[in-house]
Image: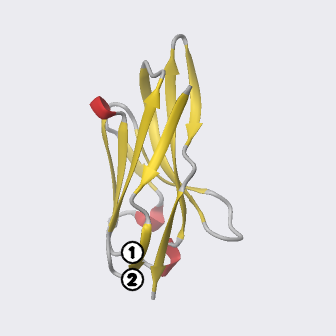
Amino acid sequence: QVQLVESGGGLVQAGGSLRLSCAASGSIFSINTMGWYRQAPGKQRELVAAITSGGSTNYADSVKGRFTISRDNAKNTVYLQMNSLKPEDTAVYSCNAAVVTGAWEYDYWGRGTQVTVSS
């Protein structure tokens, strides 16, 4: 079994910053792509940012230039540095990891952490 645990969410004023972390633990051989998703009330879940094991990244247009995704492969941890936060960034942020255990790759999700940006 693999567990993903997020931390770092909270309440921040517009223009502020937060740093999210997501640590994977359990029966992990390696992790391919890791990503952050978010879901605001009444909206579909959307990809915020993703990073491959080699460090290639991609971002949603709405966060480019404000958010930075990074990872520490030795710690099986992915980070999301969020700067210049806007009220529309308010959502539950969840991390996702494509984990290789043995001969197979499985998709795992964290439970999510709330980010609230006040105007």
Please tell me whether mark 2 sits on a helix, a strand or a loop. loop
Coordinates of residue 107 in the picture (x, y in percent): 58, 33
**Which of disc 1 and disc 2 is earlier in sequence?**
2
- Residue 76 as seen in the image, left or right of residue 112: left
Coordinates of residue 86 in the picture (x, y in percent): 43, 78
Are the residues at dot 2 and dot 1 in contact (C-beta closer than 8 Å)? yes
Q: Which mark is residue 94?
A: none
For the point 45% across and 39% down, the residue is 34
Q: Is 33 situated above or below 114?
A: above
For the point 42% across and 65% down, the residue is 63
- Residue 70 as seen in the image, left or right of residue 102: left
For the point 31% across and 34% down, the residue is 75
Please state, as top left, top right, bottom left or bottom right, where the N terminus lies in the image.
top right
Q: Which mark is residue 14?
A: 2
Going by the picture, which residue comes out furthest to the top?
103
Please tell me whether mark 1 sits on a helix, a strand or a loop. loop
Q: Is 32 situated above or below 10?
A: above
Q: Which residue is mark 1?
A: 85
State how far apart marks 2 and 1 are (Cα): 5 Å
Going by the picture, which residue comes out furthest to the bottom?
119
Q: Amino acid at mark 1?
A: Leu
Mark 1 neighbour class, 10 Å CA radius: few under 14, some 14 to 19, many 20 or more = many
Mark 2 neighbour class, 10 Å CA radius: few under 14, some 14 to 19, many 20 or more = some
Q: Is 93 situated above or below 118?
A: above
For the point 47% across and 26% down, the residue is 26
- Residue 71 as seen in the image, left or right of residue 1: left
Q: Amino acid at mark 2?
A: Ala
Please state, as top left, top right, bottom left or bottom right, where the C terminus lies in the image.
bottom left
Q: Is 41 situated above or below 104?
A: below
